[in-house]
Amino acid sequence: MTSPDLTTMVSTTVHEVSETDLVKAATAAIRLRVPDWQPREGNLEVMLIEAAAVLAGQTVYAVNQLPEVVLGGLLAINGVVRKPATPAWGQIAVLASSSIPEERTLPAGTIMRATTGPGESFDFVLQSNLTFYPGSGLVQYGEGRAVIPGTAPNGLPSGTVLELLTPVSWVETAMLTTAVNPGTAVETWPEFLARGAALLRRHSTTLVTADHFTAAALDVPGVVRAKVLNLFNPETSYVPGDAPGHLTVAVCGADGEALPEEISTQLLQYLTANALAGLVIHVIAPNLVGLNVTVNIQVKPGFEGGTVADRVEAALTAYLAPTRWPFANTVHVNNLIGVAAGVPGVELVVSTNPATDVVLSSTFAVLVNPTVTVNVV
């Protein structure tokens, strides 16, 4: 997914025409000159037109690839590479047997498997040593990261049981104590080009403007959303604009989740090293805010109410999703009405709950798991 925090990339399409369009244009041109001619499937002249259209279509396709290939090469020269996939991660609780006779350590690197169905399992690797003591400290907590980066383990809930691949006699159980923080897939080519184009717009390695910091933050693997708050020091205030010399970048993953500490630290070091001299940089996580929305609609004649309601629910859910929310601090009711009214089949948006604008935060907010209910009245 291309981050909505990047400015829109200029289209690189050179020529937009399909092979069908070419056949229609050639047929129309011949009939203009030979009005009595009737194109019939299987005729030699029709087959020649179709063959020429196929060749021309392949040429058009190849020409359209050229700008992106050139941009990709330019990005490579400037050291911009595609983001790798990042692993899902979560907190793991390990319970040791109460009969252990002496101090025991479960080492970092221990692999644990979550089996979710026939032939489906996900492996997590323990990130730090866990030390257990007889009679006390029999439950220890550590971070587990998916062995294979990507989105496959996303959604594993808290309470998922884990099995040690190499059994340890004194370990009784292991399980996730938090829902898995989502991993990310490898950056797609369109996403890479959009991000790379934003980086090239900087024309400088020094970070000065808000767009510079946004593009730089999104260049770090694991960062999916980024919002710059000018003149804001989160250590002394809750309101942006009253801290000269300070700049704060709020970042999160695809679902609004806070980033692992090492990614936040890496980002802070990167931004600080490249920022305009004199700026004090801060990196924070967003405020996670839940929201329940109810919309009552009337449906146009000829449309099935349940189908229209489902479409309105999908449209509002997408509008409020963490991956698309524009980090506005206020949910405007008029925007909700506009999204619902724009769905085909909606005659009228009768009412909404909330009925007035909702202020989410004074600084930086992400809507998490918003619930949308649509009623046909």
Image (cartoon, rainbow, N blue to C red):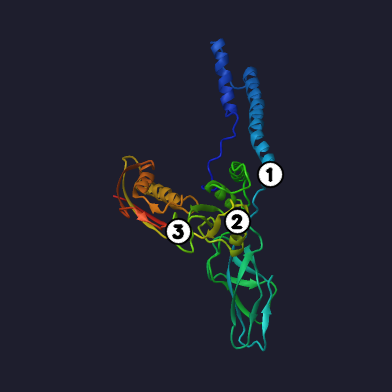
Residue 170 drawn above or below residue 304: below
**In the image, 303: left or right of 92?**
left
Q: Nearer the viewer, residue 261 or 203?
A: 203
Location of residue 156 in the rendering, given as x and y in whole percent from the top left corner: 55, 64
- Is residue 133 at least partly visible in the picture? yes
User: Mark 1 sits on what residue?
Assistant: 78
User: Mark 3 sits on what residue?
Assistant: 369
| Foreground label between 2 and 1 | 2
The residue tagged with tag 1: helix, strand or loop? Answer: loop
Mark pair 3, 1: CA separation: 39 Å
Location of residue 334 in the rendering, given as x and y in whole percent from the top left corner: 34, 47
Q: Nearer the viewer, residue 196 or 60?
A: 196
Q: Nearer the viewer, residue 76 or 149?
A: 76
User: Mark 2 sits on what residue?
Assistant: 272
Three-letter amino acid code of the residue under disc 2: Thr
Mark pair 3, 2: CA separation: 33 Å
The residue tagged with tag 3: helix, strand or loop? Answer: loop
The residue tagged with tag 2: helix, strand or loop? Answer: helix
Three-letter amino acid code of the residue under disc 3: Asn
